[in-house]
Image: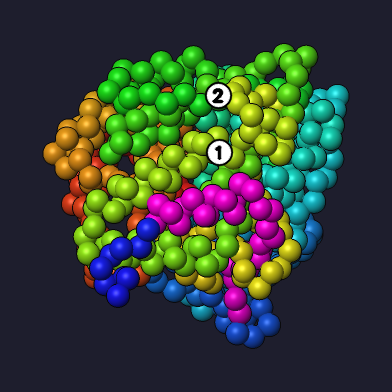
Amino acid sequence: MLLSKGKIKFHELILWECFFLFVVSVSCTPPAEPVKCWAKDSNCTITNSFGMFPDRAVCRAGNVAYSATEQELVSVVSDATEARRKVKVVTRFSHSIPKLVCPDGQDGLLISTKYLNRVVKTNEATMTITVESGVTLRQLINEAAKAGLALPYAPYWWGLTIGGMLGTGAHGSSLWGKGSSVHDYVVEMRIVSPAGADEGYAKVRVLNERDKDLDAAKVSLGVLGVISQVTLKLQPIFKRSITYVTNDDKDLGDEAVAFGKLHEFADIFWYPSQRKAVYRLDDRVSANVSGNGLYDFTPFRSTPSLVLALTRTTEETQEFFRDADGKCLDAKAIISALQTAAYGLTNNGLIFTGYPVIGYHNRLQSSGTCLDSLEDSLITACAWDPRIKAEYFHQITFSFSLSVVKDFIQDVHKLVATEPKSLCGLELYNDVLMHYVKASTAYLGKQEDAIDFDITYYRTKDPMAPRLYQDILEEIEQMALFKYGALPHWGKC
């Protein structure tokens, strides 16, 4: 039998998947609603877009309120405060991995910002944009571009909302200027917070750059109230030039910090088992430079559900048979295919003809096309859609002070030298992504310049089943936290 012998040709399957992703334009079933209720807006459960929280527990709430205006928010918060109910805010796609959205069981209340999703105004003179908290990053980017403006830095996944990004301190990658954190471009916020009986149990607080409380509110994990509106400072739209360069990773420890200071939008894909690092040379260029490039990141595109099911089955089989060789072979096939297709970059929106890829910032900074497609009965889906057999993984992110990055990388090199195949599993999920974050004035933001390491790896459906090379992965996590004092990302650990 094919599975019992562990003989699935996964690298061939990957090539077929890449054919679908790179050549064939497919539609995709939009993600499911994160909140499900057994009665109308009551007796509810809440999950994230991956369908499972880290502890695998079911998160329950008594009710959900879908506020569409600030006035409705005030009314809902007032009633909840008077009743002394615990309240949590949930976004349209609920993309955070930890249980930040879980209220107090059946006594708790969820407030969804799904319909609080309007762009209020764009001011070209002051280069600002005001949006409601449920506006997605994609909406924000597109509306700013219409006015010839741009949010300079942002996460790579555009399915996040402005409220969610501020709540968890989400960021892109840069050590330049104010840095890559979205919250550092906030100039004003409107927050609906609990209040005393004399103020009707709820009030709207308006915070701007003159208020010290803004540094507390712009990264708050949602505990200070419900964000109603946000005003962000933008920049004139500009062009970028992107080139990926692959090198041996032997000098990664020495080069990582300097590289982030050399290129404005730098990041690094690190493949430790293959002993490779892919450097992203990404900088602004003159608007006169020709190019209409587009970045539609391949792992964020819709994928045929059959391919996802076969991919997951293969990895489960490799785990069952402890097939490290198979994982390493498949990882090489995946990385080769991604690099051949330039990770989803195209020079004109259609095909990739070579580096550099030059285009306007709004076409390169973020993607996520698996979100915005028509219903197709789950023939295709985002790669992690929990309604089908698809990717199921752990994702953790640690922030390292620049001063210890070299030593941490060298320690990982030592682990790989001891067990050369131990980290191939990370490469099945593309890489260890290293991106740069600058110190912030926000109280819960970064306290110093740092490099974030995003680590993604296989998660078993059986909580009692050990993972292949689980000891190595846990050693890396413990080194990060206890030896190097790394800090976990609010939205991923």
Q: Is residue 6 visible?
A: yes
Pointer 1 residue: 341
Question: Height in image: 127 above or below 308?
Answer: above
Q: Amino acid at mark 1?
A: Ala
Q: Is residue 228 left or right of residue 406?
A: right
Q: What secondary structure is found at the residue carrying circle 1?
A: loop
Please identify, in this view, whether the residue under mark 2 or under mark 1 is nearer the observer: 1
Q: In the picture, which quadrant includes the N terminus?
A: bottom left
Q: Amino acid at mark 2?
A: Thr
Q: Which mark is residue 243?
A: 2
- The outermost residue toward the bottom is 39
Q: Is residue 409 left or right of residue 62?
A: left
Q: What secondary structure is found at the residue carrying circle 2?
A: strand
Q: Which mark is residue 239?
A: none
- The outermost residue toward the left is 418
Q: Where residue 37 appears, x then y in whole percent?
A: 61, 79
Q: Which residues are magenta?
A: 10-37
